[in-house]
Amino acid sequence: MRALNMKTLSITLLSIILIVIFMVSCDKDGISEAEYQIQYRREAQLDNAYANGIMPLNTAFVENTTVLRTRTQAFVQQPNLENLDDLQNQWVSMLKVWKRLELYNLGIIEDSFIHFEINRWPTNAEIVNGYIEGAETIDVDFIVGNGSSSKGISAMEYLLFSSDDNQEILNQFTTNPHFERRQTYLLSLAQNLEMKANELQMLWIMHKTDFISSLENGISGSQNQLTNAMVTLIEEIIISKLGNPLGNGNGGTINIEELEAYRSESSLLIIQEHLTALKMLYNGDFTQGTINWGFNDYLDLIDRRTLNEAITSSFDNCQDKLNLISESLKQELLDTPQNAIDLQDAFDNLLVLIKVDMANAIGTTITINDNDGD
């Protein structure tokens, strides 16, 4: 009888152990502990990207476009060199924020085409001049109805940096033919840009729940979309922002006018802001003193630490190559184009690591984009 009781006790203990093991290995939805951790970290990463990356950038962009609009009003009311300089500086400050926010063109944001409304590059100077020299009433509603190539950030750059001489730019707003319509067009651009910044922020507020809760490992999953957004931006840097000015498509003939924002000589600043945004998203390091989940933590979770180290090193290499360009990118292409070629090569390496190695490791489906040459 004692032996039977011991056997019964042993069976009972074994059953308890198996139940505990089962409970530990499964969450409330019946998925494995490993899968639960992956889902948990993925949600933490998305929440971090939204709360500490996307929304603060949206807030900063709204604030910067508001200041831009007020300084445009001040310049139009009193066009002088001091107000022109203040307005140009604010345009650059706004541009820096936008070039980080530009990374997050995904989901309903991408479907809305609002990024094209905010910054379609290059601007069509001929169309802009035609509107200024025309007879139609220019106001913010007129700008809303125009195509994206004649408004937004790029159109403002064309008007504010049309010459290397600020006095000549000022003359265009004070004494040249159609100067009053030029002033009105500039102010209407600034008003429309502020409006679009608020619309973009509202879209992201509405998209919050869907963005954070889309944990599926497919093309509609938010982590998948973030990976594709990184790939798209890196390809744009390689092909459009470096390759075209370097003459990659025309036998190596350098073309300064292919640089983005070449008039304001902000081309290098743009690539720097892109690189900063890409690295912050990868590491999740948007703010100090908090737990910041990023792609690097996700790779560590799935035992791909070596790949994480390679990507981190590639980011550092891109920054090192960028730091070697001490002047504007425009001047660098004229003086030492090899430095721009080396920077392009560094981004090429980063692209392979993100688009191929990281995408395969985390199960991302890479979609075709306009820059894809595959």
Image (tube, grey):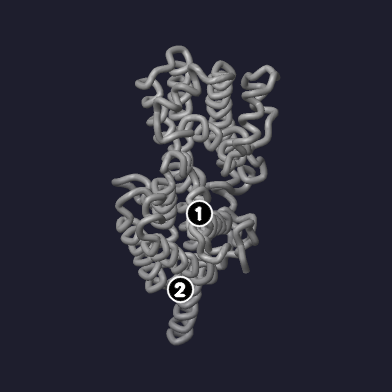
Q: Which residue is mark 2?
A: 17
Query: What amino acid is labelled 2 in the image?
Result: Ile
- Within 10 Å of disc 1 (Cα), the crowding (few <14, some 14-19, many 20+) is some
Who's the residue at 62% across and 21% down the image? Answer: 140
Task: Give the percent coordinates (x, y) of residue 334.
Answer: 40, 55
Q: Nearer the viewer, residue 214 or 328?
A: 328
Nearest to viewer (mark 2 / mark 1):
1
Q: Secondary structure at mark 1?
A: loop
Choose the circle earlier in sequence order: 2 or 1: 2
Q: Give the label on residue 75, or none.
A: none
Considering depth in this image, is 173 or 33 the residue closer to the camera? 173
- Residue 244 location, x and y as percent? 53, 57
Q: Which residue is mark 1?
A: 255
Q: How many marks?
A: 2
Q: Quadrant of residue 317?
A: bottom left
Real-space Cα distance between discs 2 and 1?
71 Å
User: Element at badge 2?
Assistant: helix
x, y percentage for residue 302?
A: 45, 70
* Camera sees residue 313: yes
Which residue type carries mark 1?
A: Asn
